[in-house]
Image (cartoon, rainbow, N blue to C red):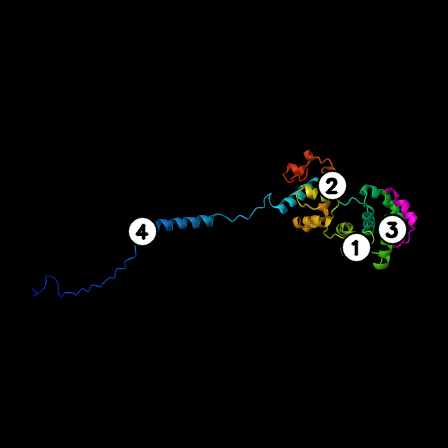
């Protein structure tokens, strides 16, 4: 049977609804903007890929160079130590006072008899002056040195209970004891970091360009500004050893100097 008004094979007509779609138009970037973005991204990625490198000290850094000098000397003189033969703070104090205006080797020839006869502060303070002078005569300046030893023995016995004090202030209050002697005792007898500026340490410090001063206190401060405290005591022994063997006062053997070969010595004043 035919259905009027319709298409063949269909019973009814479906209505179709169209949903409007909103188009979003993005702003267009220029080719130049795209190129800039790609370049910046590449630079950021490259920076992230490079590991951070800490600043490396160079030869121009005075502290680094001074440390390198001591490292070199440590390899050359691994056993460098105080040359004065002693057993304990009392003997070291006395031997150091006696080392003024003479050599450590010469002091070592008289101290065995001295310490055998006067083993402690009380015995030294009660010694007869003429007996002391006789023992000390090979060193020279025996009268002045005998007077210093008598004063030291008496001061230690009366003021410090016969014991050597552990502070620089108390040490320099003793007869004949200056800053250098106090530093020797503090560094070698008590293990306190101390810089001993003797003739060798002063000379090498100037030749190495660490200081321009001849004042021992100023030289001490200049070295302290370059070296870590753990280097102070034994580092001075190493400088002394190098000064005795190679870097002498009148005729330094620069051709045999490991410091010069390593580029660590500017040879100031030579």
Give the percent coordinates (x, y) of residue 35.
35, 48
Q: Who comes first in sequence, dot 2 or dot 3?
A: 3
- Does residue 151 appear left or right of residue 27 in this picture? right
Q: Which residue is mark 3?
A: 147
- Magenta residues, dominant SS class: helix
Give the percent coordinates (x, y) of residue 79.
74, 42
Identify the element where label 4 is drawn.
loop
Q: Residues within 10 Å of mark 1 (few under 14, many from 20)?
A: many
Mark 4 and mark 3: Cα distance apart in space: 97 Å
Identify the element where label 3 is drawn.
helix
Q: Residues within 10 Å of mark 4 (few under 14, many from 20)?
A: few
Q: Who comes first in sequence, dot 2 or dot 4?
A: 4
Q: Quadrant of the C terminus?
A: top right
User: Could you tell me if residue 74 is visible in this image?
Assistant: no
Q: Nearer the viewer, residue 73 or 255?
A: 255
Tell me, yes or no, whether the two marked residues, 4 and 1, touch with CB atoms within 8 Å: no
């Amino acid at each position: 049977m035919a259905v009027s008004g319709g298409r063949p094979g269909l019973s009814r007509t479906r209505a179709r609804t169209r949903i409007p779609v909103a188009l979003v138009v993005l702003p267009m970037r220029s080719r130049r903007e795209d190129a800039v973005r790609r370049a910046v991204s590449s630079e950021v990625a490259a920076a992230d890929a490079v590991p951070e490198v800490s600043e490396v000290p160079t030869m121009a850094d005075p502290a680094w160079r001074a440390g390198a000098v001591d490292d070199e000397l440590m390899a050359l003189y691994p056993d460098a130590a105080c040359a004065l033969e002693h057993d304990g703070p009392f003997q070291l104090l006395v031997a150091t006072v006696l080392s003024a205006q003479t050599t450590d080797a010469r002091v070592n020839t008289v101290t065995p008899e001295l310490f055998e006869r006067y083993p402690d502060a009380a015995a030294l303070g009660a010694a007869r002056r003429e007996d002391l002078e006789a023992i000390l005569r090979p060193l020279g300046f025996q009268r002045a040195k005998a007077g210093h030893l008598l004063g030291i023995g008496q001061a230690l016995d009366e003021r410090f209970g016969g014991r050597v004090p552990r502070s620089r202030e108390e040490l320099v209050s003793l007869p004949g004891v200056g800053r250098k002697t106090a530093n020797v005792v503090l560094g070698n007898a008590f293990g306190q970091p101390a810089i001993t500026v003797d003739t060798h340490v002063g000379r090498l410090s100037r030749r190495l360009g660490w200081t321009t001063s001849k004042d021992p206190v100023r030289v001490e401060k200049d070295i302290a500004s370059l070296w870590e405290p753990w280097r102070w005591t034994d580092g001075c022994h190493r400088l002394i050893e190098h000064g005795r063997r190679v870097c002498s006062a009148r005729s330094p053997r620069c051709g045999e100097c490991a410091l010069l070969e390593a580029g660590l010595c500017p040879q100031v004043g030579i």
